[in-house]
Amino acid sequence: MIVFDNVTITFGNGGHALKDVSFAIGGGEFVIVEGHSGAGKTSMMRAAIKDLPISHGKIVIEGDDLSKISSKNLPLLRRKISVIFQDFKILMDRTVAENIDLALDIIGLDGDIVSKRRTELLELTGLRGKENYFPIQLSGGEIQRVAIARALAPQPKVLFADEPTGNLDALTGMSIIKLLQDINEQGTTVIMATHDLELVKDLKLRRLRLDKGELVHDSHAHHQPKVDTAGADKHHKGEEA
Amino acid sequence: MKKLATTFRHMRRYPYQSLAAIFMTTVTFFIVSIFALVVLGAHSMLGYFESRPQVTAFFKDEAGANDVEQLKTDIGSAIALDSARYISKDDALEIYKKQNTDNPLLLEMVTADILPASLEVSAKNVKDLETIAGIMQKNSSVEEVVFQKDVIDTLRKWVGGVRVAGIALSSLLIFASLTTIVVILGLKFTAKKAEINTLSLLGATGWYIRGPFVTEGMIYSVTGSVFGFGLSYLTLLYLTPNIISFLQDITLLPVPLWVMMSLLGGEVFLACMIGALASFIATRRYGR
């Protein structure tokens, strides 16, 4: 479960990336976060992996209050929540297989398990046969698939996809969305940020709309999960004890 | 093994920077080894002289056997003698010939007449050397007294000077090596900032990210220490015949294997410390 409770992110010059944003997303949901460029979609995702400090409010992810997670334990959080970045963040000097292996190596897997898991991910993302290609040899859609495969490597509970269709044509974009839906059907919570309203207009999914850092619309607001940030405190106290 | 592979990939990608770091540490440990060997050798020489408390009196040409006996008696009545050895002019010539067998030109020019007879006196206690020297100097048949306390004092001063110079120069070079590794690793760390940021976002721990850099720093300094030690050992082997010929009776060489291995072990340990400290500083300083 992901809870944003009155989250505000203020910049040094007084501007807001997010302003009093509150919502809760239950496990296994597929949510689309809409908004124009600069609406706060990327800031929201960066805040969720503690890559951007919040000025006010509380974020609870899978029972962990982010404000109580030390820098030592931050890697563990980031293995539970994967992000597909807008700029991919693929290592260009490594092959498709090496990019995926990197994520598996980070979580401490090695040997046969790595090759088995890599094969599964290549199969899932339709990259079978391209494992020895360098990113420069791939199309934009294929690079996006590498980013998805790498993000899925640690078997995260939550997958954030920041503009995963941003640089792709409509057909390729739809195939990426279909892939994210397949991943969601396997139990992973998927949160997809996009500014391309046309591409997602026919999808029967929950939508959060951000505008100038504020949450202006939540399509499932009336039946969203109850926000229980106190539970996170109890969870943490239990961990500390 | 994977982390070691990552380290070697970093090194291969910037080979000249890696060579610069290894070269600097090699020079540092070459100088450290040379100074260590010189100081160790000088200590052994001091030990040699201190274990032989000796005063030598060189007699005038007109001195006879009675004068020598009288001097022996005077010394023997004043202190506890360990040994007293009279070396006649002929004995002195024999010794001279032995010392210069390789140089016939020097042998041709010398006869027993121009070499002085002498009396070498060893005391049981090094403190008695000054008393012996005093008795010898008062004796009218004695021309010159060579007192090894002077030699030991001079040698001790030299050893002290060499030690201070060695520590100062070694410290300076160690600092230069440390700085070189910090700068080189820092440049590499900065060049890979985007990749490091990606690793962090993928959930890599601090050690996962810093580990290859720490290993790299230690590889530079340990490789440099082994090369520096190897070079100094080769230099020592090259100079061994000259050193043996110069020191004659004083047997410093060959240096025992355990001494060389201890020196190598100490240097590798120091290198590990330098490499670890340099990479720690670099990843802290440039990782902000």
Image: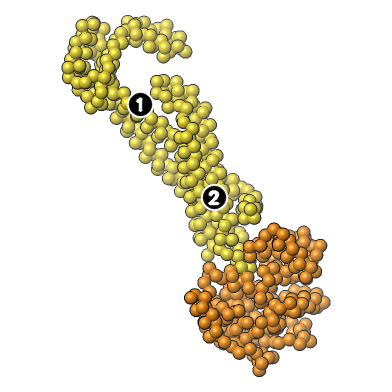
Q: Which chain is yellow?
A: B
Q: Quadrant of residue A91?
A: bottom right
Mark 1 lies on a secondary structure that is: helix
Residue beneath the point at 71% across and 82% down? A30
Residue beneath the point at 56% across and 63% down? B206
Residue A120 shows in the view: yes
Residue beneath the point at 51% across and 61% down? B284
Identify the colour scheme used. Answer: by chain
Residue A210 image point, x, y percent: 65, 86
Residue B217 image point, x, y percent: 55, 51
Res. B48 mark? 1
Who is closer to the viewer here, A102 or A216?
A: A102
Q: Which chain is orange?
A: A
Horizontal relation, residue A141 to residue B181: left or right: right
Horizontal relation, residue B65 to residue A138: left or right: left
Mark 2 sits on what residue?
B218
